[in-house]
Image (tube, helix red, strand yellow):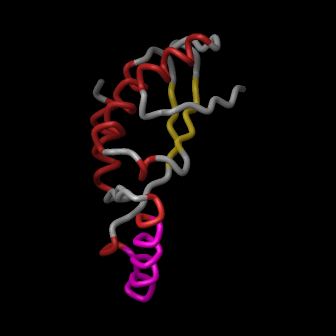
Amino acid sequence: MKLITHDATDIDSLLDELKRLGHHSSSPTIFLLEGFVYYISRDKFSTLLEKLAAADGKKVVILDYVLPFETIHESNREKSRLMLRSLEQGLGWPIMVYHKFDITGLIQFLKAI
């Protein structure tokens, strides 16, 4: 097992780094994208998953994502909105949110690759 810290938004460089460290695309692999998906654009996220899915061998991707406000229970919605705004102001860019069907649709699409 290896922990790799790398700029995952630079996808080709990330895949090159994996190869350099001895990873073979046919090897069973777990990709843990925790605390990450909401900081990159939808295009980069989709591209990353497509390239991971295109490799040979069994792959598992574990990730977390931010739900849209309308899916959060009404009693927690305002707190969530304030937290997210505060985080966005601190970072200086918007946080990406995904509906569950966005993620499941992408997974279904990737299974077809």
Which of the 4 image quadrants contains residue 65? bottom left
Is 75 in the magenta?
yes
Q: Is residue 15 left or right of residue 23?
A: left
Question: Horizontally, is 62 left or right of 65 in the view?
Answer: right
Image coords of residue 101 (percent x, y): 29, 54
- Magenta segment boundaries in residue numbering: 72-87
Give the farthest residue toward the bottom. Answer: 75
Between 29 and 9, the residue placed more toward the observer is 9
The percent coordinates of residue 18 (x first, y second) are 56, 18
The N terminus - image quarter: top right
26 versus 98 height, above or below: above
- Residue 47 shown left or right of residue 28 in the figure: left
- Residue at 43 percent across and 70 percent down: it is 84
Q: Which quarter of the figure is the C terminus placed in? A: top left
Q: Residue at x 42, y 67 (%)?
A: 89
Specify the principal SS of the magenta part. helix
| Magenta highlight on residue 59 | no
Q: How many marks?
A: 0
Q: Residue furthest right?
A: 1
User: x, y (%) of residue 35?
Assistant: 54, 51
Q: Which x, y percent locates residue 10?
A: 42, 28
Q: Nearer the viewer, residue 105 or 93?
A: 93
* Residue 67 image-quadrant placement: bottom left
Q: Give me the residue at 33% from left, 67% from top.
A: 68
Identify the residue shown where x is 30% and y is 44%: 42
